[in-house]
Image (cartoon, rainbow, N blue to C red):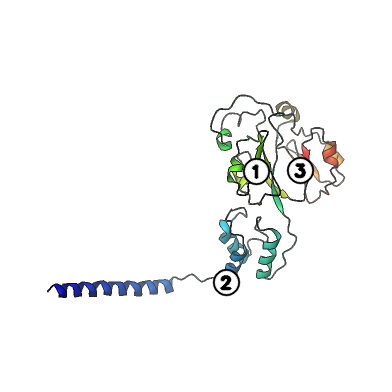
């Protein structure tokens, strides 16, 4: 009697297992997702950082977008020219002109030159400091808060806090864009690696207000605009902007800037 009970149990369990395996096999074939071999090849060529610097959800998202024609073969800011050329070969297209980019902090307001309205004692985090009255203790409401939120997300150890502001080492920067998203003040942007002439300020206040808040702030005087022979500089919202496509890196604007906020 006991043997029969065991035998029946084995048959029932075995039968259930067989039915489940048949069901799963049918389910897998019916709902199988077709693998796009070209997409897989592009994904394999990408560095696999999944940093999101390309604007897509990870490397798989970018690979799918490239194959669909929704992103350029040079869409990976981390991979640079080598990865772009490898993907271009897979896609059967030309890689085109690939510009290496690095992150740059548009602020030169160190503790020595930037004024302070009060002593901040809250959480030592940029996002926390940015929501207090005045967006931090500095007199300039557009300056770097210096608590290193960008530094904490950098995987390449490319960011240091020097004199109360973030400084990025272009040789270490991987162009992933994590620091761009981490900065609550919007001070970090990706700029061409070769562009050694940059505006280190983000203040949109009028000149007199900026000058009072920070000794190294752009006052929108327009001297740089008049100096540039190539039409590469404009002043918008009281701040100078450089068109890197027009800039020939002659450094004339930096030499003439009275506030020395155009850096080389």
Quadrant, the N terminus = bottom left
Q: Is residue 9 above or below residue 174?
A: below
Residue at point 85% right, 46% down? Answer: 250
Q: Secondary structure at mark 2?
A: helix
The disc label shown at residue 159, or none: 1
Residue 210 % position (x, y): 72, 30
Q: Which residue is mark 3?
A: 198
Question: Is 220 placed left or right of 26 in the picture?
Answer: right
Q: Which residue is mark 2?
A: 37
Crowding near pointer 1: few (<14 within 10 Å), some, many (20+)?
many
Residue 143 % position (x, y): 67, 34
Q: Is residue 164 above or below residue 159?
A: above
Residue 81 % position (x, y): 71, 60
Quarter residue 124 falls in:
top right
Residue at point 68% right, 60% down? Answer: 74
Residue 71 % position (x, y): 64, 60
Question: Is 153 placed left or right of 263 in the picture?
Answer: left
Quarter residue 129 falls in:
top right
Q: CA distance from mark 2 to mark 1?
A: 38 Å
Q: Residue furthest top?
A: 118
């Amino acid at each position: 009697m006991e043997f029969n009970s065991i035998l029946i149990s084995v048959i029932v369990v075995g039968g259930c297992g067989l039915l489940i395996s048949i069901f799963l096999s049918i389910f897998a074939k019916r709902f199988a997702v077709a693998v796009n071999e070209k997409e897989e090849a592009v994904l394999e060529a990408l560095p696999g950082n999944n940093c999101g610097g390309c604007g897509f959800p990870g490397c798989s998202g970018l690979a799918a977008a490239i194959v669909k024609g929704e992103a350029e073969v040079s869409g990976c800011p981390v991979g640079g020219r080598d990865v772009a050329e490898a993907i271009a070969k897979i896609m059967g297209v030309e890689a085109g002109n690939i510009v290496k980019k690095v992150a740059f902090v548009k602020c030169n307001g160190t503790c020595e030159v930037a004024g302070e309205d009060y002593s901040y004692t809250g959480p030592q985090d940029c996002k926390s400091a940015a929501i207090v009255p005045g967006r931090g203790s500095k007199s300039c409401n557009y300056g770097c808060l210096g608590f290193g939120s960008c530094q904490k997300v950098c995987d390449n150890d490319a960011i240091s806090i020097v004199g109360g502001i973030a400084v990025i080492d272009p040789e270490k920067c991987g162009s992933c864009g994590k620091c761009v998203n981490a900065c609550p003040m919007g001070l970090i942007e990706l700029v061409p690696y070769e562009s050694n002439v940059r505006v280190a300020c983000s203040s949109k206040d009028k000149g007199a207000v900026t000058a009072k808040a920070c000794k190294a702030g752009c006052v929108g005087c327009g001297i740089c605009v008049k100096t540039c022979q190539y039409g590469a500089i404009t002043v918008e919202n009281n701040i100078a902007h450089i068109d890197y496509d027009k800039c020939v890196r002659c450094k004339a604007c930096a030499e003439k800037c009275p506030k020395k906020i155009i850096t080389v």
